[in-house]
Image (tube, grey):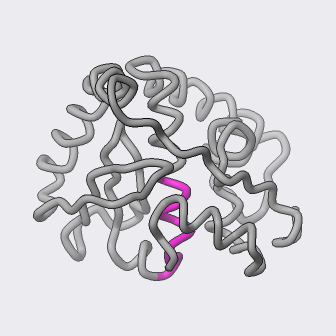
Amino acid sequence: MKAARDIKLLVPRTRSGGIACVLRAVWTAPTSAVGHAVARLAGCGRPERIGGVAARATLYRLPSGRCRGCSAIAIGHVVIVEPSFAEHHGPWLLAHELAHTRQHDWLGPVYLPVHAVLQAISLVLYAVRPLSKYSPVHAYNPLERTFICVPIDVVHEPPLESELTQKVLRAFALAA
């Protein structure tokens, strides 16, 4: 297990606007549509916009008491959170989910199947070699721990406050 100070964080680059923004929206539209549909089916309330120069998304909060055991998920540019889980884990949970929206920007409609396959592989590896503090689908999933600017590690053990951590949170508009 990595110590909090050993978590590899990267300050995400600013997303460009203009035609790149339009192309990103079109590329992620299928998965974002799935995200909005899931939020509506789950009975989420009114959405709100979150994010900053690194990534933006629509945030839905699950109704209290519904979907217990759920934590948070990013589907396209839609983030769905269980309110008490989000409150307990603070801005790092939202930073992690916003980092997933950046992965959606790269993989577009193939993100969901790729992530599902990697979660299944992680589940198998976890059965052989469990890692404490991680769920079986997160422990060995590179989209959760390696190929992401804010790995799931920060949710389990937030990094020590530093100039780097503040830059990361500011990029996602989660710190002043």
Q: Quadrant of the N terminus?
A: bottom right
35 on left or right of 153: left
Q: Quadrant location of residue 83?
A: bottom left
Q: Nearer the viewer, residue 25 or 3?
A: 25
Residue 155 placement (x, y as % from top left): 62, 67
**Left or right: where does residue 145 sit relative to residue 18?**
right
In the image, the segment drawn in magenta is 88-98
At a point 42% along the width and 80% down the height, the residue shown is 87
Q: How many marks?
A: 0
Measured along the vertical axis of the image, is residue 46 above or below residue 55?
Answer: below
Question: Which residue lies most toward the front here?
Answer: 18
16 sits left or right of 63 in the view: right
Toward which corner of the image does residue 127 lie, by quadrant?
top right
Which sits in the foreground, 166 or 66?
166
Does residue 1 appear anywhere in the picture?
no
**Position in image of residue 146 (x %, y %):** 74, 41
Residue at position x 45%, y 30% in the image: 105
- Identify the residue at image location x=80%, y=55%: 8
Give percent across and percent down for residue 132: 78, 63
Position above or below: 90 against 116: below
Task: Report the residue at 64% width, 66% height from top.
Answer: 167
Picture coordinates of residue 44 (x, y %)? 16, 60
**Is residue 113 magenta-colored?**
no
Relative to 45, does residue 19 appear above or below in the rendering?
above
* Residue 9 visible in the current orientation: yes
Magenta stretch, overall SS: helix
